[in-house]
Amino acid sequence: MPKKRVTSGMRPTGSLHLGNLLGALENWVSLQDRYDCYFFIVDWHSLTTPGGCGAVGYENIGELKDNIHEIAIDWISAGLDPEKCSMFIQSLVPEVAELYLILSMVTPLGWLERNPTYREMVKSYAIESPSYGLLGYPTLQSADILLYKGDFVPVGKDQEAHINMTKDLAARFNNLYNRDVFPLTEALLTEVPKVPGIDSVNKKMSKSSGNHISLSLGEEETIKRIKSMFTDPVKIRKDDPGHPDGCVVYAFHKIYNSESLEGIYSECESGKRGCVDCKMQLAAKLNESLRPIREKRKELEKRPEIIADILESGASRARDIARDTLEEVRDAMKLPTRGIFNV
């Protein structure tokens, strides 16, 4: 039986951080052994919003090339294997733009206007006059998935609604043209660990907030970031009783030092553990965990041609599928297809 197909993408924000690694990338690495995977860097999506805090937007698109290079290095360093999955840049498969145009003709405006992410992005970026591209972002996202006939998209529960729109749009197209061109894509729900920012257990790690730890950082820089972590404000002296549940450092120990949690908790709560020592123990565990990724990163940084070859090969494989999908779409819609005037 052929493998089911998984599709997913990331914006080219440059080097990834721990939240990206734990929230998506590690899961992708495990999926590539079980599914036919297509992972893409969605550069066109960058054009829908302004930039800032390391993210490329429509006004600083010149930074895109470097950001794409950095994110591709992180993907491969973390374990994505070009022999097991296809990695490519969204815009190097121009067929996605044609499918986006076609799907926009059958996407109800109300679906887009009710999309909560659209309203959140308008608010967070303080956009006074939203573009058509931003409003149509979910349709472009659907085109990214449906062009390769993705059966599943790995997401957390909070993103399931995005995939449901893709499923609804696929069903709408199939019904309109009485042809089962697209699969009814399902969310491949994954347990996404909560990765807090270094400033608060209640804030999500993100580049826009500046509270992240990038995979590209060296060990000493990582130690500095961990030393700056916000801890228990009530614990002034080393022997003061602490409150681990509200401490960012303890939240990271849960991820990178789970075998020692019981001892860490009791020592902190009883005032036997100082914050500095706790941070240094975490730094050692985190640096140990990231060492293989960093070593691979250093190798790839010296050979940029490898990254280019991987992305170009991935785009070539993706285009083969994309062309066939568009032929089916055009045929279903009675639009001209290749060879229409051949005799």
Image (cartoon, grey):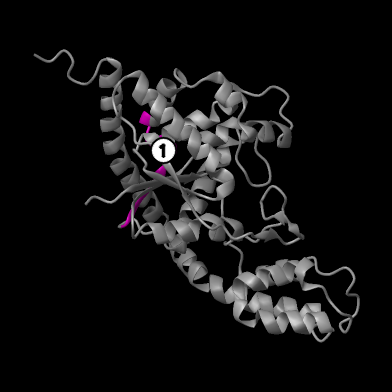
Give above or below for 109 relative to 215: above
Q: Give the percent coordinates (x, y) of residue 96.
A: 40, 31
Residue 127: say if magenta. Answer: no
Residue drawn at the location 66% of the way across and 35% of the way down: 121
Residue 90: say if magenta. Answer: yes
Q: Quadrant of the C terminus?
A: top left
Is residue 228 visible from the viewing direction of this image? no
Rendering quarter of residue 142: top left
Position of residue 17 in the picture relative to residue 200 (left or right): left
Give above or below for 260 relative to 298: below
Rendering quarter of residue 336: top left
Residue drawn at the location 88% of the way across and 74% of the way down: 235
Is residue 231 visible from the viewing direction of this image? yes
Q: Give the percent coordinates (x, y) of residue 236.
A: 91, 75
Residue type beneath disc 1: Ile
Q: Give the percent coordinates (x, y) of residue 240.
A: 89, 80
Residue drawn at the location 56% of the way across and 49% of the way down: 157
In this view, the residue farthest toward the bottom is 272
In this view, the residue farthest toward the left is 343
**Foreground: 16 or 330?**
330
Position of residue 233 in the picture relative to residue 250 (left or right): right
Position of residue 268 in the picture relative to residue 16 (left or right): right
Answer few, some or many: residues within 10 Å of disc 1's Cα (few below 14, many 20 plus, some between 14 and 19).
many
Find numbered disc 1 in the image and state the secondary structure of the residue it sits on. helix
Q: Give the percent coordinates (x, y) of residue 340.
A: 18, 15
The residue under label 1 is: 145
Magenta residues, start to end: 84-95
**Foreground: 173 or 223?**
173
Residue drawn at the location 67% of the way across and 55% of the way down: 205
